[in-house]
Amino acid sequence: MTILVTGATGNVGRHVIQQLTQRGAKVRALVRNPAAAKLPDGVEVVQGDLLDVDALRSAFQGVSTLFLLNAVVPDEFTQALITLNVAREAGVERVVYLSVIHSDRYVNVPHFAGKFGVERMIEQMGFSATILRPAYFMDNDLTIKDVVLGYGVYPMPIGSKGLAMIDARDIGEIAAIELLSRDRAPDGDALTRINLVGPDTLTGTDVAGIWSDALGRTIAYGGGDTAAFEQNLRQFMPVWMAYDMRQMAERFLTDGMVPETDDVERLRQLLGRPLRSYRDFAAAAAAAA
């Protein structure tokens, strides 16, 4: 049977597809522009998006399992619900959904609350599902690498509670493992939730120290000015999204993204290897500078 991957050309989606194809899975990717997709040989590429009901109906033909990943957009919740309903119409029983850690706690953050609503829909509809809840993607920090290099400041307002940052490659591999597990599971297999975290829970000062070691010079932590963070984001994203990100950053400061006691060991056993560290990520980014 076929696994349908949405969000296939994004950072995580590409890793998911790579891991699935390496494991011999039959993969279909839903993309907006097939000509620009550049996915591995053997992947069936179909055109469409999560609001195109006709394209979804076509894409779900012969599909056994869905990987649902949709971007942070104003109609993210609607996109997910339409996709789940069309999947159910097509007889799809198995879903792996990429949500976010603490979706049930960061209730004032729009894209967190939306993802928690999707989680509840998956549960209410009775899918055999795995809900993946990743913490902060360490890969996000590639967007501020120039600030770190040029100004000697780590500017992300991640605070002092700590974030268990995870590498997108680990997310992709775990998602592929769970998709194959779901695809082979018996009907009616229970819903599970898995926190996706990195091996270390890091504060802003910790991350600045890691960059200092990687670059061989002092990098300062920029602190927790979320108002300035929002204004900076407005330069390259819509106003609503910058505000959404500010709300998330404020929860970083008050709550952090701290894993449960057994999260790291659970993921290590699932992967059969250690999780990738932020120190390794920063060293690679510094070497590529």
Image: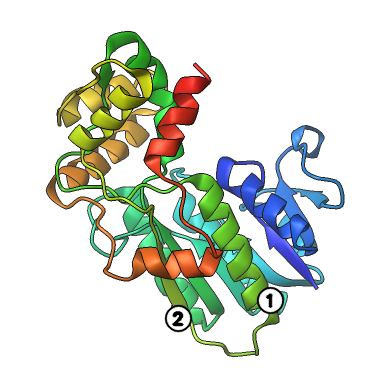
Classed neighbour count for the residue bearing mark 2: other residues with Cα under 10 Å, few (<14), some (14–19), many (≥20): few
Labelled pair 2, 1 in contact (Cβ < 8 Å): no
**Rendered residue at 24%/26% (across/down):** 229
Q: Front-most of 87 and 17? A: 17
**Rendered residue at 80%/45% (across/down):** 40
How far apart, in angstroms, are the residues tagged by discs 2 and 1? Answer: 20 Å
Indicate left or right for 126 with 147 as reference.
right
Q: Given the image, on which type of amino acid does mark 2 rest?
A: Gln
Q: Which residue is mark 2?
A: 124
**Rendered residue at 21%/41% (across/down):** 203
Whether residue 54 is visible to the viewer of this picture, yes or no, is no
On the rendered image, what quadrant is the N terminus found in?
Answer: bottom right
On the image, which quarter does residue 160 sit in?
top left
On the image, which quarter does residue 181 sit in?
bottom right
Indicate left or right for 98 with 217 as reference.
right
Q: Which label sits on residue 86? A: none
Q: Which of marks 1 and 2 precedes in the sequence?
A: 2
Classed neighbour count for the residue bearing mark 1: other residues with Cα under 10 Å, few (<14), some (14–19), many (≥20): many
Q: Which residue is mark 1?
A: 183
Indicate left or right for 39 with 112 as reference.
right
Indicate left or right for 111 with 106 as reference.
right
Disc 1, SS: helix
Whether residue 171 is visible to the viewer of this picture, yes or no, is yes
Disc 2, SS: helix
Q: Front-most of 275 and 176? A: 275
Task: Please tell me whether residue 165 is drawn above or below residue 121 in the rendered image.
Answer: above
Residue 283 at what x, y percent from top left? 44, 29
Q: Front-most of 161 and 125? A: 161
Residue 73 at what x, y percent from top left? 46, 43
Q: Given the image, on which type of amino acid does mark 1 rest?
A: Asp
